[in-house]
Image: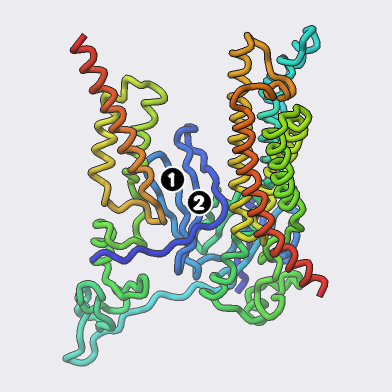
Amino acid sequence: MTARLVACTRCRAPLPPAGYNAPHLGTCACGARWQVAVFPAALRTPGRGAAAETVQVEGDAGCFFHPAKKAVVPCARCGRFLCAVCDVEFGGEHVCPGCLESGRKKGRIQQLETERTLYDSAALALAALPMILMWPLTFLSAPIALYLGLRYWNAPSSLVPRTRWRSVVAILLALLQIGGWVVLVVTLVNR
Amino acid sequence: MADAPIPYIKLPGRGVRRGFLALAAGRCSLFRGPDHLLAVERTIATEAYRRFYYRDIEAFIVRQTARRRNANIVLAILALVCGGPFFWAATQNAEPGGWIVAGSSFGGLWLVLAFINTLRGPTCETHVRTAVQLEALPSLGRLRVARRVLGILQPTIDEAQGALDDQAYLDAGWTDPGAKPVGGGVRGPATVPEPERLGGAMHLGLFAALLVGAILAGLFSYLGHPALLGAGTLVMLGGGILCVIALVRQVGSDVPGSVRGVVVAAAAYYLLGFLAAFVFSIVYAIRHEGQSVVTGLEFAGEPGFATAAGIAAGLAAVLGLLGLAFGLPHWGRREGGAAG
């Protein structure tokens, strides 16, 4: 079998294997200068999916989802018996599609998360941007920033390492702005 | 029960993926996980994640681009547009000092950016290919950074995928001799660059400049002679340039973390120094009814300047000594090793 060649990312023409993993930049016919690092996965033939065995002997455990198919492993999360088709190996565990889906929906499986809201960044943006761009807006934005900073103080933030300085700065800025408004209102009332 | 947090390690480089509007631009960075590479794209208040499992990565494709040259052209035009009129006005004016300072400030800013852009090295676009996708990695936008990241990832990916023998390579139809395995593995050594070995001239020059500047500033605060101030200003300018070069060149190099830290602190010191000089110029102009500062020697008699110079001298001396204390053993040992 011939492996798929790596293509130029500008003209999509296949790049010659002679230049793969070379120390210098190669030149494509389109003029683009490129360097390619190829790994063994590029040369592997795709494997065929496992087929589930049919229950042969009475007493053999059947799959929870396909009772006629022989169970090969229990789900590590819910304990249901799974056939080779239903078994999903994920993060070193064998789980069923149901647990995988519910874990994804509830955000319990980090490796399935594709997006997170950064409440600390939102609070900081709300605390800082109106102050710079249009300060009267801080009358509304400061309480919201303070709420976000406090409400989501313990909420899971980014998947990657991240400190709490944004929340701290947002809360301090919001408090200062609220204090400023209070002073302004009190001064105007007493005048 | 929720999973335990996955330990991620930040990889060098950051970039921007342009959206429909400039505001929608996502800041991208890469993290190394235990069994996958995590591409993070951050907008104002959200983070999106893409995972590339080491066992699935087929190739990284790096293509050199002309972005650095184009950016330099734009920056040069901006320097000309912003600084040119002031220099033209200087030629028309009997007292050109203020115009020259203004032109240098407004035009010089863009030239400094062009200089930094040049020093950061050639630009590129990097893509990662798996069996079912080809994704851009905007954080690997400089050739030097892309090569460094590939060097970091290569052992991990090789470990996850295992090595292929020569036969598997030939069976796949890649019979070109240039692509044959080097040293028994499929991968050649080229994409696994060693960290760049810096000679250390820029770093040691910077630390020396800090020390010389400290001595000159100390002498000035004690003797108050304007010549010392002039020499100190020149040394500070030279040190600032060396600092920028050292900052850029130490990316992807074997410079120890302690020396890097001193260089970053020196950059902050110079930045604060230039800002302080700017503030002093404004104060001087206010106190002397619009007279502008041309050479810096005008500061010599200003109240409080000698004290500020003394403090700056102390800071520069500490940074210079720290830099030499961390840097000399590193470069000295390497020289010794090389000689041996």
> Residue A68 appears at what percent x and percent y?
21, 80
- Which residue does the numbered mark 2 point to in the structure image? B29
- Which residue does the numbered mark 1 point to in the structure image? B42
> Residue A138 appears at what percent x and percent y?
31, 25
Q: Is residue B222 left or right of residue B54?
A: right
Q: Is residue B257 left or right of residue A73?
A: right
Name the kind of residue labelled 1 in the image.
Arg
Q: Residue furthest front?
A: B223
Q: How many numbered circles are shown? A: 2
CA distance for labels 2 and 1: 8 Å
> Residue A76 appears at what percent x and percent y?
26, 75
Image height check: is A62 above or below B90? below
Chain letter of disc 2 in the image: B
Q: Are marks 2 and 1 in contact (CB under 8 Å)?
A: yes
Chain letter of disc 1 in the image: B
Check disc 1 and report its element: helix, strand or loop.
strand
Residue A120 can be seen in this image = yes
Nearer the observer, B230 or A41: B230
Which quadrant of the figure contains the C terminus of chain B?
bottom right
> Residue A10 appears at what percent x and percent y?
64, 48
Residue plotted at (23% across, 23% down): A182
